[in-house]
Image: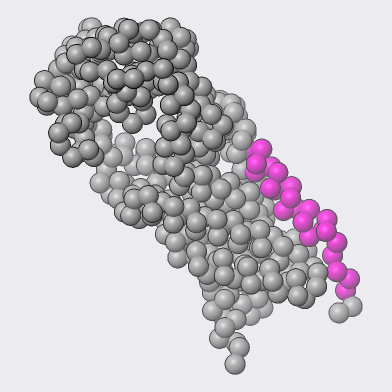
Amino acid sequence: MSRKDLGFRAIFGAPIILFVLSLIGLVGALLEDGLWDWLGAALLGTPLLVLTWALIRRRG
Amino acid sequence: MQTRTIRAWTWVHKWSSLVSTAFLLMLCVTGLPLVFTHEIEEVLLHQQWEPGRADGAKLNLDQVLEVALSRHPGDVAAFMSFDEDRPVVNVTSVDPKGPADIYNFQPIDQTSGAPAPPVAGHPVMEFLLQLHTDMFLGLPGMLFLGAMGLLLIAALMSGVVLYAPFMRRLPFGTVRASKAARTRWLDYHNLLGAVTLAWVLVVGVTGVVNTLATPIIAFWKDTALKELTAAYDAPVAAGERASLDAAVKRAQAALPGMTLQFVAFPGSSYSTDHHYAVFFHGDTPLTTHMTTPALIDARTGELAAVASMPWYVKTLSLSQPLHFGDYGGLGLKLLWALLDIATIVILISGLYLWLAKRKKKP
């Protein structure tokens, strides 16, 4: 293979960000009512947005 | 990563998944409608019910108890719980001479003392819940599903480790859509696993904790609850008891601002032989699952203790909302459903990848 292997950040960067956002959403909605219900859902929804993005731009 | 290391993690991922997949699929499929239990039962079981007295004057709890027990002569009271959206008190009693597990459950209109229609779950939802909780096998079934949850956690961990060698030349989010089905589904499997990890892990871990509910409560009763009552000897006979209504009022005064949830009578599970255990919960999504009992001496009606729950019971209480997803409105429930479906796709694609790999081998 001529291409270089990707580093840790390139492989795990996006998943780690999604992991942290989801966790903040899960716990945030638990701690507070009202605004946090929506904020929590929005944060927990980020993995699904990213998934949609990946499925739309999937390539060859 | 060394080939040997990868091979070891592959072995963990393969076997933890293979053993648990059928059960995890069952949990995901039954869990999907269960997320919307409240909404579904609202539609299926909607019934109009009006309390007997419109002015809202209520019987006190001693009167409610007397009415309930008069309908099952010989029974002793075990629990009393309170509906949140209607003036109904539910009395659970048991015949001390009969089988121990047969309870009589009576919803009673607190304004008139008349029986009120029970708000039992829909039979289909009850069936799904039972299947999801213990597969109709009681405690062994629950613990077995807990073990399947532990395998899920092992599969997630090994999946994270294996993600690195699989993705070392593919940018995040790659789906090689024009390649062979196996390659394509490997990409879907990796992508879905990578983005949903936090949710699957939280629901998995809290699910495992929930399977330990029975031993956790039993341990609490055998240790923390027993310590509070070491000073007593003989159980309180029903005739020697102080007023229940006064006991609940006394408990409410000790825990202002909290919502009354249920009362456990002396001798029942959740209490001691000597106390009314009056349970309260808080009002935020976090504290609504956190119960705090106030123990009232059943002879004197005096406050004996406010038994703040130990950490392991609090952990169990926290695990319930995080597993059910019922704490952040309909938006959160919809996400629970979508992420549940994503998990089903991960499980099925994983199974497919294993089958496809086996077929390729000579």
Give the camera-side residue of B241 and B172.
Answer: B241
With respect to residue B357, does A17 lie above or below?
above
Give the camera-side residue of B130 and B74.
Answer: B74
Residue in the picture at 59% in, 92% down:
B362
Residue B10: image location, x then y, percent? 66, 71
Residue in the picture at 85% in, 61% down:
A7
Q: How would you classify the magenta stretch by its main secondary structure?
A: helix
**One can see residue B100 in this view:** yes
- The C terminus of chain A appears in which quarter of the rendering? bottom right
With respect to residue B227, does B136 lie above or below?
below
Span shown in magenta: A3-25
- The N terminus of chain A appears in which quarter of the rendering? bottom right
**One can see residue A52 in this view:** no
Please tell me whether residue B49 belongs to the stretch shown in magenta. no
Residue B293: image location, x then y, percent? 43, 21
With respect to residue A3, does B151 lie above or below?
above
